[in-house]
Image: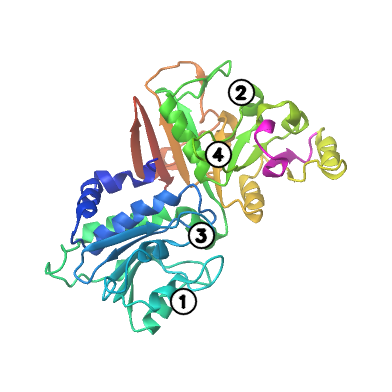
Amino acid sequence: MMDIRSQKLFSEFGLKQLLTEVAVGPKKINISQAMAIAIYEAYGGAQRVSPNPLVGCVVLDSHGNFLSKGHHEVYGSAHAEINALKKLDREKLQDATVVVTLEPCAHVGKTGSCALYIKDLPVKRVVYGLVDPFHLVSGKGAQIIKGAGKEAILYSEFKDSSEGKLTPMMSAKEKEFISSQLEILAENFLKNFRYSKPFVALKWAQSLDGKMALKNYESQWITNAQSRNYAHYLRSVYDVLIVGAGTVHQDNPKLNIRLEGFDLERKLLIIDPDATVFKSYDRLAFSKYHKKENVFFVVDTNSSETSIAFNLTVNPPGSFKNVLFLHKNEAGFFPLEEIHKFCFERGMKSILVEGGPTTLSQYLNQAAFDRVYAFVAPVIMGDGLSYSDQFSISSMTQRLNLRSVEKLEIGDDVLFTGLKNI
């Protein structure tokens, strides 16, 4: 399934034609073109590599011809560099260039070190998109490669000296565009290691007039079947899904991932102030699709039902252990950063928030998100419930702006996504 974050590689970079040309080869390409292919390739691992980053790799021969590509496919399996290089014999790799979206790893973990693997090959250089922020790698992977007498060059610092003799020249505009795409590709991973926080995305479906449901909470279906299928793809690429108790009680949803061929279960967290979902767990639809150890709750410490929830977490064998008891803030809502900290400490490095309206409004009020996915359907619903009903500003200077916006047409629906402007 096409990841919407790669749309501009096609619309602004002409990647569709480039991929066609390298497939029939031989085709000389520049480093920016190679990096664009590597970025697109990396999205192929979006559903299965967490908590590792998405990484793609392209190999060029000594004349700048495309040789191969690969990506990190599954957590714990071979990394992108290995998948791209293992297909090639040493003769083809003589003076070759390895283009990879992230600095090759220096340490040995679930897999071997990519930097150590590359240093023993007859390649000339490695051009990497970003410095790996992980302390066991940061700068060390590049140093291993340089120590073997090869070039290791950060993409933003790469100087195109070919003068068109070997490959098409790179432009400054191309480099700026690709640099921004590299950051987007690694956005989850970079947020985790730069700030020790999970990456948070908000998702909703709305009518043209911004409604998520009617006043009676009816919402099935605003968008078309293809959009709903894409929403399941989004669930598959984030570690945990967050919803509010109101959504569970009104819709009684399964909250699982219904994609053909996808067999992993993601975690689920329910913002449940009065423990009403917690107490009704066995009677609700989602309980049939999630193991108890993968379901988490946030409960109000001061709720009259808190003692019941607390007793259920510590007494009967096999009961829930994953409950966060929180005080509400002065506005009467939970501090969302505390919920995110709870998730991060339990290995949930990326979060998808699906609402409903009250939960989404609080995420907007606290500006506690990194990315938005908004599915917009060509329908008008009139008086209804909106994701921004409880979000208000007094000045246009307070508005929440998005950057790096992408859009994907899904039948008659349109999916918009963008990063919070900081």
Q: Nearer the viewer, residue 240 or 333?
A: 240
Disc 2 or 3, which lies upstream in sequence?
Answer: 3
384 up-or-down from 243: above or below: above
Q: Is residue 196 visible?
A: yes
Magenta range is: 287-303
Q: Is residue 349 left or right of residue 417?
A: right
Which residue corresponds to mark 4?
353
Which residue corresponds to mark 1?
140
Q: Position of residue 252 (x, y in %)?
A: 64, 24
Disc 1 or 4, which lies upstream in sequence?
Answer: 1
Number of numbered discs visible in the structure rendering: 4
* Residues at circles 1 and 3 in contact by the CB criterion of under 8 Å: no
Q: Amino acid at mark 4?
A: Val
Q: Is residue 422 visible?
A: no
Q: Amino acid at mark 2?
A: Asp
Secondary structure of the residue carrying numbered label 3: loop
Secondary structure of the residue carrying numbered label 4: strand
Secondary structure of the residue carrying numbered label 1: helix
Q: Quadrant of residue 416?
A: top left
Disc 1 or 2, which lies upstream in sequence?
Answer: 1
Q: Quadrant of residue 247?
A: top right
* Residues at circles 1 and 2 in contact by the CB criterion of under 8 Å: no
Q: Amino acid at mark 1?
A: Lys
Q: Residue at x 56, y 68 (%)?
A: 109
Q: Label 1 vs label 4: CA separation?
A: 36 Å
Q: Label 1 vs label 3: CA separation?
A: 21 Å
* Residues at circles 2 and 3 in contact by the CB criterion of under 8 Å: no
Which residue corresponds to mark 2?
251
Disc 4 or 3, which lies upstream in sequence?
Answer: 3
Front: mark 4 or 3: 3
